[in-house]
Image: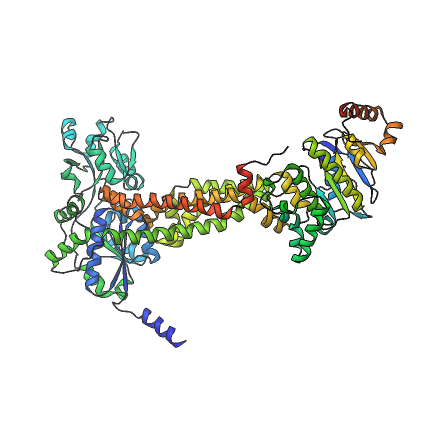
């Protein structure tokens, strides 16, 4: 459980994440999904209860474990004073990776994430929105983490960039076979990426399952309303 | 090992090869008397360090006690009333006893008295039938203004007001030289004078009679550290030749030569010594360029050292303030309060600890330099976008690595702007260093005010302004070199967040 002031922001929530599967945390804004992601990352400590990563409690001061988890913050969070390549390789260099290994990994990731090598030498301000998002993803993947956490990875992109990146992301998740948790408020996007969906409302987990389960067997009327509202909004615009 | 030991012995060897440090306060008569003493000391072969125009009795007195100054001219009344706070004016014997208890001695009187008096324009005094200070009590409408020192010291305005029951309100504090001009132009009606001031006849002033004896005797004497008798007996002997030799008219004459004829105090002093004591002292008056070069050197040293200290202290303080919110409020509060301490007060406060010269000035300037840097470091760090802060944390960077690789580079434009502000302020404030003997561009400004010489004031003010501009330009270049290019890009075209 996490509180901010007297308000309970999240919980109590019991949720387990399957390895090598993609889970989407979904729900209206303020429903606690980003807070849960930060708790998983160990950026916040729960006020009550505990988080386990492979049976071990997640601590906020455990830097070594953080490096096993890749995190893409909402908006990308690229450091404006560093070139794209330096953004991606920052941690690897501080923990003493040799130069050759760094540049090899950079090229690997650029290929995987479809980023032109020329863009690596640019500053974030010189990149397009889509490129910035790719660089953020590369940064999260640099140390080959076991888990990838993404907060609204397609949050603020124009529709064309968005659909391109969406396809790429799904391909990357598929190729890497990592455990992925991503936050979105868009049901179509959740369905597109994720095997399973966890729907949140006002800090509570309402239902967890595949999209089909949510449609066929809604836990509450809110689930039905949420699914239908998203359908209407999407207006067939959802990819596939 | 032997050579340094011999060298130390040579330096410590007693005798008249010693250096005698001669100081003066920042009014012409004091500067002249000190110059007379300095030239006499030089005839004995001893070398002289001049500490001219120090900012008031407190400053010189503290420096004498600390041993930063060996000898300076003062007045018996000032010593009794201001330094020792004796209420009934004691006599000279009593004063000598009090001085001895502090390890200080004085010469016999030099010959003239320079007492406080209250001066008015003759024409106004005649119109109002004012002849004595008592007469002022029946004219509450008169506008009085006194020198800051006279306003504050026990034997000054407070004593005068209670002795004569003076009714005037809204009494202002002014610089002595400015007060004369205000008096002459009719902006004020009365001010404190010294009875040997050359301005009294020049501006057609009347020194009102002290009919109730509010002011004690002010015999001019030299005050010196008792150990001077042992360290430089011949130098002291030479200064003693002035005992009883300068009359009040002679002093007024010398003051007038400096004040109104534009003759340097060194030349006036040398002229007096030649005529009266048949002592021929070599006079070397520095030309404008030599003076300018020396003052520039002093000023640059003051600014460079104090700014370096301010940066070294303020950036860590700013980081700390940004990390701990409660400590941050305290730090910003304290640094802000330091800024409100009047600069002269801060300088005088430093004297018992650091003596006179560059050190107290550097300490005070460094303290004044803190606020802009601390505040901008704090603001720069606190203003970092939360998603950047979170990204750095999520990457698993250590606190130190986060600070060094992410937070400080992101805050660098703000920090540099703070350092720039601080540097420009320091260039200006460093002119006050002259009050505690630190030299710099403040020295010609002090001299210029003392001699009512605009060109002398400009000799300090213009280079100070140019230096401030140069410093600003230097930091603009530094900004280009130090602020990461990526930041310059993102501030010129904000990254589209769409």
Percent of width and height locating residue B354: 39, 54
Percent of width and height locating residue B96: 26, 55
Most foreground residue, A212 or B299: A212
User: Which quarter of the figure is the N terminus of chain B placed in?
Assistant: bottom left
**Image side of residue B105 versus residue B474, left or right:** left
Most foreground residue, A36 or A20: A20
Can the viewer see residue B55? no
User: Which quarter of the figure is the C terminus of chain B placed in?
Assistant: top right
| Residue in the picture at 81% in, 26% down | A227
Residue A174: name its quadrant: top right
Percent of width and height locating residue B357: 34, 54
* Residue B379 in the image: above or below residue B14: above
**Image side of residue A63 versus residue B130, left or right:** right
Residue B8: name its quadrant: bottom left
- Which residue occupies the extreme bottom position in the image? B2
Most foreground residue, B335 or A235: A235
Can the viewer see residue B28? yes
| Residue in the picture at 17% in, 57% down | B242
| Residue in the picture at 89% in, 27% down | A216
| Residue in the picture at 38% in, 46% down | B470
């Amino acid at each position: 459980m996490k509180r901010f002031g007297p308000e309970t922001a999240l919980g109590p929530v019991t949720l387990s994440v399957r390895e090598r599967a993609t889970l989407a945390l979904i729900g209206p804004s303020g429903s606690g999904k980003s807070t849960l992601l930060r708790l998983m990352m160990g950026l916040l400590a729960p006020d009550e209860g505990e988080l386990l990563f492979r049976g071990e409690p997640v601590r906020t001061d455990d830097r070594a474990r953080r490096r096993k988890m890749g995190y893409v913050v909402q908006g990308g969070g690229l450091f404006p004073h560093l070139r794209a390549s330096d953004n991606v390789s920052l941690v690897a260099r501080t923990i003493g990776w040799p130069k050759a290994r760094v540049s090899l990994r950079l090229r690997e990731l650029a290929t995987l994430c479809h980023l032109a090598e020329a863009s690596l030498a640019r500053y974030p301000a010189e990149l397009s929105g889509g490129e910035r998002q790719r660089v953020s993803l590369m940064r999260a993947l640099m140390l080959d983490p076991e888990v990838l956490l993404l907060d609204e990875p397609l949050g603020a992109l124009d529709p064309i960039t968005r659909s391109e990146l969406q396809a790429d992301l799904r391909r990357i998740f598929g190729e890497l076979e990592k455990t992925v948790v991503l936050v979105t408020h868009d049901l179509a996007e959740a369905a597109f990426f994720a095997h399973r969906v966890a729907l949140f409302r006002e800090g509570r987990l309402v239902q967890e399952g595949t999209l089909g389960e949510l449609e066929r067997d809604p836990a509450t009327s809110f689930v039905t309303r949420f699914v239908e509202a998203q359908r209407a909004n999407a207006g067939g615009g959802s990819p596939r | 090992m032997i050579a340094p030991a011999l060298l130390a012995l040579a330096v410590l060897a007693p005798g008249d090869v010693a250096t005698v440090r001669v100081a003066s306060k920042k009014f012409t008569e004091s500067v002249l008397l000190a110059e007379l003493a300095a030239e006499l000391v030089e005839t004995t072969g001893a070398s002289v360090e001049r500490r001219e125009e120090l900012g008031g009795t407190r400053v010189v007195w503290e420096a004498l006690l600390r041993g930063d100054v060996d000898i300076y001219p003062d007045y018996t009344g000032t010593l009794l009333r201001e330094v020792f706070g004796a209420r009934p004016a004691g006599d000279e014997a009593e004063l000598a006893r009090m001085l001895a208890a502090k390890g200080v001695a004085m010469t016999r009187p030099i010959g003239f008295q320079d007492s406080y008096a209250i001066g008015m324009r003759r024409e106004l005094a005649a119109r109002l039938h004012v002849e004595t200070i008592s007469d002022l009590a029946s004219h509450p409408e008169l506008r009085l203004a006194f020198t800051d020192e006279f306003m504050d010291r026990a034997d000054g305005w407070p004593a005068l007001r209670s002795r004569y029951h003076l009714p005037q309100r809204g009494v202002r504090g002014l610089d002595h030289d400015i007060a004369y001009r205000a008096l002459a132009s009719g902006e004020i009606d009365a001010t404190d004078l010294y009875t040997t001031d050359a301005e009294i006849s020049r501006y057609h002033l009347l020194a009102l009679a002290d009919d109730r004896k509010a002011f004690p005797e002010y015999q001019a004497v030299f005050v010196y550290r008792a150990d001077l008798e042992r360290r430089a007996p011949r130098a002291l002997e030479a200064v003693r030749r002035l005992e009883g030799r300068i009359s009040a008219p002679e002093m007024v004459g010398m003051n007038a030569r400096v004040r109104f004829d534009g003759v340097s105090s060194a030349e006036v002093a040398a002229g007096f010594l030649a005529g009266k004591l048949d002592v021929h002292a070599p006079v070397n008056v520095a030309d404008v360029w030599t003076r300018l070069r020396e003052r520039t050197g002093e000023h640059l040293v003051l600014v460079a050292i104090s700014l370096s200290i301010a940066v070294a202290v303020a950036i860590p303080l700013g980081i700390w303030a940004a990390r701990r919110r409660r400590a941050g409020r305290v730090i910003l509060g304290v640094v802000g309060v330091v800024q409100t301490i009047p600069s002269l007060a801060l300088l005088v406060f430093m004297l018992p600890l650091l003596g006179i010269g560059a050190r107290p000035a550097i300490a005070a300037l460094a303290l004044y330099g803190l606020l802009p840097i601390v505040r901008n470091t704090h603001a720069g760090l606190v203003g970092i976008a939360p998603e950047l802060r979170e990204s750095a944390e999520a990457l698993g960077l250590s606190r130190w690595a986060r600070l060094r690789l992410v937070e400080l580079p992101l805050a660098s434009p703000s920090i540099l702007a703070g350092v720039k502000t601080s540097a420009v302020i320091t260039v200006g404030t460093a002119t006050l260093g002259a009050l505690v003997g630190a030299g710099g561009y403040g020295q010609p400004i002090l001299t210029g005010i003392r001699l009512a010489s605009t060109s002398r004031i400009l000799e300090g003010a213009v280079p100070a302004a140019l230096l401030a501009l140069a410093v600003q330009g230097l930091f603009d270049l530094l900004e280009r070199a130090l602020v990461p290019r990526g930041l310059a890009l993102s501030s010129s075209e904000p990254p589209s967040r769409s």
